[in-house]
Image (cartoon, rainbow, N blue to C red):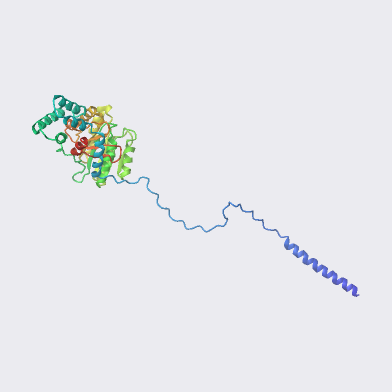
Amino acid sequence: MTLLLIIVAIAVLALILVGVTVGLVGRRTKPAKAPVPPRSPSAPPTTVEPSPTAEPEAAAPSAHTIERPEATASRLVRLRQRLAGSNNALGRGLLALLSRERLDEDTWEGIEDVLLTSDIGVAPTQELVERLRTRLRVEGSADARTVLREELIALVDPTLDRRLQVSGTDGNPGVVLVVGVNGAGKTTTVGKVARILVAEDRRVVLGAADTFRAAAADQLATWGERVGVEVVRGPEGGDPASVAFDAVKEGADTAVDTVIVDTAGRLQNKQGLMDELGKVKRVIEKQAPVTEVLLVLDATTGQNGLIQARVFREAVDVTGIVLTKLDGSAKGGIVVQVQRELGVPVKLVGLGEGPDDLAPFSPEAFVDALLS
């Protein structure tokens, strides 16, 4: 009996042990979580951090920085130096001849030759030689350089009014019409004149009325962007008078000080060009008077420049001359001859490719540069 009880107890205990073992195995055989793949050493951490609050981006700098043009006073000093270094063959030649111990006829003929080859012209040359002869004969021991300086300044005529007429009346803006043949630097001059006026704190509008030359309006727009000046333009090949009219209207509506209008310069179609310029001027003056007509001439063209001047004088009432490229192969005498030819003063001279290489013309500074 005792043996039977022992056997039963052992059986019960075995059943209990089997039950416990099955429970443990069941727990262990639950599906395991997929293993996390190993991380590459170069991979960024997978931890997701909260995104910071987006900050407003700083405004991008303007593609076109507004420039501050050079003041007139410093232009005169710098341009005088440049002229002295490039265009004083006239002064040197005259001083060498006048400094001779004896001023005979051969010497005076040499002086005439120097003057004529410098594009001064026949009549001004004869006038200057006669005055030099008289003064040096009468004053005897007078300094030749001093006499020459005084007579050259008188020949260039310091009494002419060289101020730019850029102010209007009766509430109208001043209107500057710029004319000249293609290649003389007309559109560039418009941009440079705008810089001079901006340097004087004037408000300016530009009119791109040269609608027939490819990229003329784009060129003018670039000049305007550099100094913050508005440019009024029309379609390529459009009516120049219409563009000029719109530019002056815009200037009047926005109360600017000056409107500068660029024009076409296709001299090969001379009669058509002259008729067109006349029309542009008439259309402008339906709104406001034209206060200045600037004729741009390439100083290196010599006699050709004078022919151009005569053509434009017939079409519009030229009031001032801009001589460009006077620092190149130009001969200084062109200043005298073109003033005599047109009866109007040289008001501005260009002496380089820089944006501020345009300055008011000063007879005294010009002569001093020639004689330096």
Q: In this view of the protein, which residue sits in the foreground, 115 or 186?
A: 115
Q: Is residue 334 visible?
A: no
Q: In this view of the protein, which residue sits in the foreground, 79 or 300?
A: 79
How many numbered callouts? 0
Q: Quadrant of residue 252?
A: top left
Residue found at the very far bottom of the displayed protein: 2
Q: Is residue 25 visible?
A: yes
Please give left or right for residue 27 compared with residue 108 in the image.
right
Please give left or right for residue 242 compared with residue 158 in the image.
right
Q: In this view of the protein, which residue sits in the foreground, 129 or 284?
A: 129
**Residue 334 coordinates in the image, percent (x, y):** 21, 31
Residue found at the very far left of the displayed protein: 138
Q: Residue at coordinates 88% horizontally, 73% vertically from top-left?
A: 5
Residue found at the very far front of the displayed protein: 101
Specify the quadrant that holds the C terminus. top left
**Residue 64 coordinates in the image, percent (x, y):** 35, 45
Q: Quadrant of residue 222?
A: top left
Specify the quadrant that holds the N terminus. bottom right
**Residue 126 coordinates in the image, percent (x, y):** 14, 27
Q: Quadrant of residue 183?
A: top left
**Residue 262 coordinates in the image, percent (x, y):** 27, 37
